[in-house]
Amino acid sequence: SAWLERTKSHWSKSYHERPDLEYLWVNKLFRKLVGPDADGGDPRAQSIWAKVPKISCEHGKKGPMRDRLFELMLAPTTPELMEEVEKDRETPMWKLAFREQVEDTSAYWYVLKRALAQAERS
């Protein structure tokens, strides 16, 4: 695939030859792949990417970065958040990596336990 070839090409270059795309190298490399032809975009990748539904990551909007989600996930589980976890079938991902201390009564652990239970049933 063009994505695999682009990634291999980037990492096969020596440190001094390779552009420094920093921490978000995956995002930057992918954006170039699906970007305009003039910026090195791949027409087939552009066509496929154009068909993918777009989900907002803007804070305060419905989606994986919705308002105060990180704080809510670290707090004790509330009935409202439990209902959201159980019923939300549109949000593709909850943030499941934290650097903070996470208590076993937190919503974070609730989501992990639910995911484990669902995986064990399938």
Image (tube, rainbow, N blue to C red):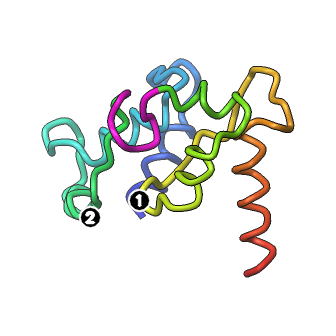
Q: Which image quarter: residue 5?
A: bottom left
Residue occupying the point 27% across, 48% down: 34
Quadrant location of the C terminus in the rendered image: bottom right
Magenta stretch: includes residue 65: yes
Image quarter of residue 103: top right
The range drawn in magenta is 59-67
Residue 45, position as x, y percentages in the image:
28, 59
Residue neighbourhood size for the residue with mark 1, other residues' Cα within 10 Å, grouped as few (<14), some (14–19), many (≥20): few
Residue beneath label 2, please? 48
Image coordinates of residue 14 in percent, x first then y, are 58, 28
Prevalent SS, magenta region: loop
**What percent of the width, then of the height, locates residue 52?**
29, 61
Nearest the eye: 26 or 86: 86
- Which amino acid does the dot numbered 2 rest on? Ile
Check disc 1 and report its element: helix, strand or loop. loop
User: What is the residue that sits farthest to the right in this orientation?
Assistant: 104
Q: How many marks can you see?
A: 2
Tell me if residue 109 is in the magenta stretch: no
Q: Amino acid at mark 1?
A: Glu
Q: Single out the residue that lies furthest toward the front.
A: 79
Q: Which mark is residue 90?
A: 1
